[in-house]
Image (cartoon, rainbow, N blue to C red):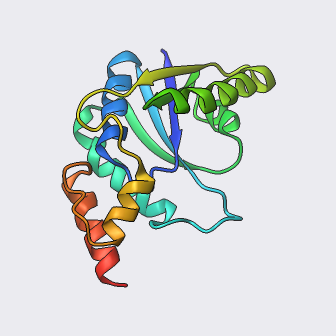
């Protein structure tokens, strides 16, 4: 049974992430979406637990082969702990490929964990969580690039100050 780990911060999860998850879920018997958390750094806009809950709500209709888990530490250690055969990374463009290739090389060299790249496609192919946060923080409309529940959470977070 082939399993993959799709790691990231997902702060917040957006439609580009969900497109990658759908694609990977069709290719693997089991997919773990790993929400990475470094306890020595601030948690970000949403807490790690909030991010896990948001993603779980969005993948609930994708079938039983997608799980969402929180992890800290090395992504390769998380892959081993979750029983993943490989890592999956989404690529928006050439700059992503450059950075991800270096990480993939180190993960394969130091821990023997291969990485599979999934090219971003569709209308949310170039979305980045950083821009989603910035635009939402300034009152912009990100409803076309995030699920409705995430849009609501962003609106609530920024209206609360």
Q: Is residue 88 above or below residue 37?
A: above
Question: How many numbered circles does the render carry?
Answer: 0
Give the residue displayed 37% in from the left and 50% down from the top: 13
Measured from the top left, where is residue 124 in percent x and y?
28, 38
In this view, the residue in front, 57 or 18, is: 18
In this view, the residue in front, 103 or 60, is: 103
Question: Given the current orientation, which residue lies at the most extreme front position?
Answer: 94
Question: Given the current orientation, which residue lies at the most extreme right position?
Answer: 110
Determine whether, in the image, residue 116 is placed left or right of residue 158.
right
Question: Given the current orientation, which residue lies at the most extreme bottom position?
Answer: 161
Measured from the top left, where is residue 17 in percent x and y?
37, 39
Measured from the top left, where is residue 5 in percent x and y?
52, 31
Give the residue displayed 52% in from the left and 65% down from the top: 44
Determine whether, in the image, residue 35 is placed left or right of residue 77.
left
Q: Is residue 104 above or below residue 135?
A: above
**Residue 110 lies in what quarter of the image?**
top right
Measured from the top left, where is residue 58 in percent x and y?
27, 47
Quadrant in which the C terminus is drawn: bottom left
Give the residue displayed 53% in from the left and 19% down from the top: 116
**Residue 113 lies in what quarter of the image?**
top right
Q: Is residue 50 above or below residue 120?
A: below
Q: Is residue 44 above or below residue 81?
A: below
Give the residue displayed 33% in from the left and 39% down from the top: 16
**Residue 120 lies in what quarter of the image?**
top left
């Amino acid at each position: 049974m082939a399993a993959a780990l799709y790691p990231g911060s997902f702060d917040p999860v957006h439609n580009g992430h969900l497109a990658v998850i759908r694609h990977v879920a069709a290719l693997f018997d089991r997919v773990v979406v790993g929400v990475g958390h470094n306890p020595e750094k601030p948690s970000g806009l949403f807490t790690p637990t909030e991010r896990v809950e948001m993603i779980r709500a969005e993948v609930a209709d994708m079938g039983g082969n997608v799980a969402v888990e929180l992890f800290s530490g090395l992504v390769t250690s998380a892959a081993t702990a979750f029983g993943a055969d490989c890592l999956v990374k989404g690529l928006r463009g050439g700059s992503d490929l450059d950075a991800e290739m270096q990480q993939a090389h180190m993960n394969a060299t130091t821990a023997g964990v291969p990485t599979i790249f999934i090219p971003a496609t569709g209308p949310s192919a170039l979305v980045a969580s950083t821009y989603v946060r910035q635009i939402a923080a300034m009152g912009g409309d990100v409803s076309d690039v995030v699920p409705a529940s995430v849009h609501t959470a962003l609106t609530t977070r920024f209206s609360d100050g």
